[in-house]
Image: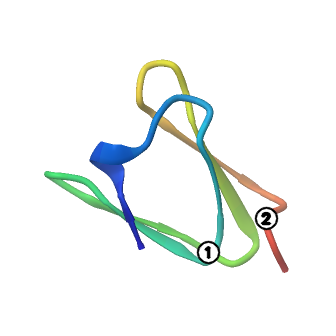
Amino acid sequence: MYDGTCLHPDHEIEGPAIVEEPFTTIVIQGSQKAVVDAFGNYVITQGGAS
């Protein structure tokens, strides 16, 4: 579990993981990876830990 307010740009998260934001919760599956972009968006792609 991650506190989304503490993540910085270029932070990478490999699933499985949960990111808690003030107004939403993001679930990252075991086969996915998320990267925080310069605007604070989560870019989720396939290819995280198996």
Residue drawn at the location 23% of the way across and 57% of the way down:
24
Circle on res. 48: 2
Along the polypeptide, which appears first: circle 1 or circle 2? 1
* Residue found at the very far left of the displayed protein: 23
Whether 9 is drawn above or below 3: the answer is: above
Image-quadrant location for residue 11: top right
Between the C-alphas of marks 1 and 2, the distance is 8 Å
**In the visual, does 13 lie left or right of 39?**
right
Residue count near mark 1 (Cα–Cα under 10 Å), binned few <14, some 14–19, many ≥20:
some
Q: Amino acid at mark 1?
A: Gln
**In the visual, does 17 lie left or right of 16?**
left
Tags 1 and 2 in contact by the CB under 8 Å rule? Answer: yes
Residue drawn at the location 53% of the way across and 73% of the way down:
17
Name the foreground residue: 7 vs 17.
Answer: 7
Q: Which residue is mark 1?
A: 29
Quadrant in which the N terminus appears: bottom left
